[in-house]
Amino acid sequence: MTMRVIVLNGGSSSGKSSIARCLQEVLPDPWLAFSVDDFVDAMPARLRDSETGIAFAPDGGVSVGAEFRALDTAWSQGIAAMARAGARVVVDDVFLGGPASRRRWEQALAGLDVLWVGVRCDGEVAAGREIARGDRVRGMAAAQARIVHEGLTYDVEVDTTRTEPLVCARAIAAHVG
């Protein structure tokens, strides 16, 4: 089977999107990249900061409602359909629900060859990146740094605390074949 999907899981500001862009450069074939941020940006504005959509607490906590979950299922199924149609896809996500979050992707990607990648970053370093970005609720990166990995195992793990995205991407690409 040919590797069609790479799933990057890590907390906010851990470097997933930067790694995804680097993967697009180092992998020999073209790969599409989709992030959870793309999904949230694509949602109607009325579902942001909403009980039924997605809400961000002042301390960086994130909660999602029924409409978010329904759209998220369609999102993951759509990405899986692209991979089944022949596209190679890098998914950048935040598994706030730990193993349950991974299971929803496993269900959507059933039958596809998937590389599961844990993207780790020290909470303090991620918090510094979060401040520098200026587009995140402060506290989100530190809150997510560990919890998104609880109860999960990966094919590959990288740590962006002191390792550049390109080096991480090369390490991941070595497992793609």
Image (cartoon, helix red, strand yellow):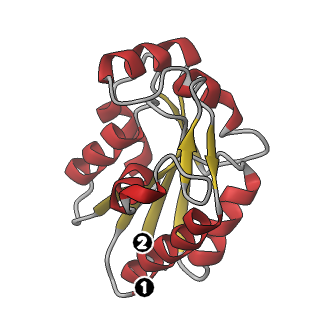
In which quadrant will I find the C terminus? bottom left
**Which residue is nearer to you in this view: 115 or 137?**
137
For the residue carrying disc 2, how many other residues have a C-alpha within 10 Å: few (<14), some (14-19), or many (20+)? many
Image check: 18 left or right of 84?
left
Vertical relation: 103 (above or below) 49: below
Q: Position of residue 68 (x, y in %)?
A: 56, 63
**Which residue is nearer to you in this view: 160 or 133?**
133
Residue 69 visible somewhere in the drawing? yes
The residue at 28%/64% (across/down) is: 32
The residue at 75%/54% (across/down) is: 99
| Location of residue 157 (image quadrant) | top right
Label at residue 21: none
| Amino acid type for the residue under numbered disc 2 | Arg
Query: In the orientation shown, which residue stands out farthest toward the right?
Result: 151
Q: Secondary structure at mark 2?
A: strand
> Mark 1 or 2, which is nearer the eye?
1
Count every numbered label the image shows and give the total: 2
The residue carrying mark 1 is: 84
Q: Secondary structure at mark 1?
A: helix
Vertical relation: 129 (above or below) 26: above
Image check: 168 left or right of 55?
left
Q: Position of residue 34 (x, y in %)?
A: 35, 59
The residue at 75%/39% (across/down) is: 150
The residue at 44%/53% (across/down) is: 36
The residue carrying mark 2 is: 4
Q: Position of residue 91 (x, y in %)?
A: 43, 58
Distance between mark 1 and mark 2 Cα atoms:
8 Å
Q: Are marks 1 and 2 in contact (CB under 8 Å)?
A: yes
Task: Give the mark nearest the N terminus, 1 or 2.
Answer: 2
Query: In the orientation shown, which residue stands out farthest toward the bottom?
Result: 85
| Amino acid type for the residue under numbered disc 1 | Arg
Residue 170 visible somewhere in the drawing? no
